[in-house]
Amino acid sequence: MTAETLTGQTTIPPAGAAGGLRSLDQWRNLFAGFSHIILVANSDAVDIEDLRKTYPPTTLFVFFNKVYKVLDHSFSGHAILVSRGGPKGANIVRLGEVEEVLAFFPKDKFLGILNLRVNADEKLNTAQQFAGAPTGHLDLTGFGSDFYPQAKVPTSGFVLALWLCDLQMPASIVLAGFSAKRSDKWRVVSVHDWAFEQVFLRLFSRVGKITVHGGVDANAYAALAGRFPEIPSHDIAMTIAEVLSERVGNANAEIDKLISLTNVIRSIDNFFRRLPKFRKKRAPPQ
């Protein structure tokens, strides 16, 4: 596929254009060819068809790793897949899921794989390990270390959203499904600071740096200042913190009780987790 001009100002990069990219300028040029860049979180809140209807054909959809949990058929829009490196390389490589994931992206509009590294212990993979798919590498080691909570690791979506904003491109950066909510399909991994990321992204949205698909709910606590004009705003904030601290403390006490009550169940679960795993192959997307 050759480069395609869909508007007077937007030139869409050709399929496979991510292959071999490494420098920040190369990645900037790639992303600059789109009017909108939508980061699609692996979340139950994502409605792919709604996103396709809402945004123009000059939109790039950025997916992450195990897309079979948000896609149930082939995706026909312009897309790129972000695969985060781990200590043993990308999960979809380590688990043998590369071909299963790539089957969702027809080659005519698929830019390729963005193999991301954020921490020094994360290992990048080669294009050969990604079944020969066009693969570029983005090394953002240490990104956010000056403000992200210590002993926690930022999520790939959070890092990419902030990094794209730092590029100051004309494209609109849109977040879809960034709810940080636990569900039957998705667990909220404790290695990330989900509360911090939600605060940061909502502030970014309220100052116009990014757009949250579906909007951000109004801050009900902010209305308290109008209801109690005689109370300084910092006193209101301290009262909110006091109540939330008590709520967290009470929740932790109940969690401790549950941990004690489920010792036997967790021992059985740990035993079965140590057994060899046999994955059931999914049917290829239509």
Image (cartoon, helix red, strand yellow):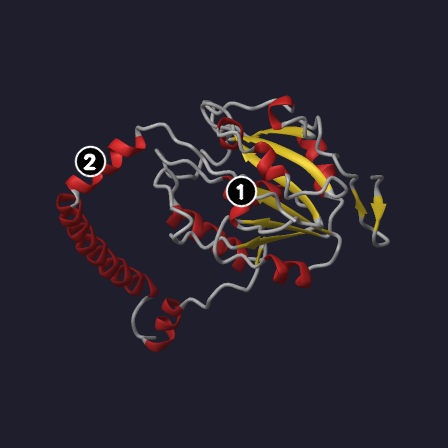
Residue 248: quarter of image: bottom left
29 and 95: which is toward the camera: 95
Residue 193: quarter of image: top left
Q: Which residue is mark 2?
A: 267
Note whether 186 is above or below 271 in the view shown.
Answer: below
171 and 89: which is toward the camera: 89
Q: Is residue 68 left or right of residue 270?
A: right
Amino acid at circle 1: Arg
Residue drawn 75% across the image and 34% down it: 17
Q: Position of residue 208 (x, y in %)?
A: 58, 57
Residue drawn 29% across the image and 71% down it: 231
Q: Tell me the number on the disc at residue 242.
A: none
Tag 2 secondary structure:
helix
50 and 96: which is toward the camera: 96
Note whether 181 is above or below 168 in the view shown.
Answer: below
Crowd class of label 1 (few under 14; some 14 to 19; many from 20; radius 10 Å): few
Q: Position of residue 184 (x, y in %)?
A: 38, 52
Crowd class of label 2 (few under 14; some 14 to 19; many from 20; radius 10 Å): few
Note whether 161 is above or below 152 in the view shown.
Answer: below
How much space separates mark 1 and mark 2, taking CA atoms? 30 Å
Amino acid at circle 2: Ser
Q: Position of residue 232 (x, y in %)?
A: 31, 67
Tag 1 secondary structure:
loop
Q: Which residue is mark 1?
A: 282
The answer to whether the residues at label 1 and label 2 have Cβ atoms under 8 Å apart is: no
Q: Position of residue 104 (x, y in %)?
A: 63, 44
Q: Is residue 103 left or right of residue 13?
A: left
Which numbered disc, 1 or 2, marks the residue that appears first in the sequence? 2
Q: Quadrant of the N terminus?
A: top right
40 and 211: which is toward the camera: 40
Q: Is residue 159 left or right of residue 152?
A: right
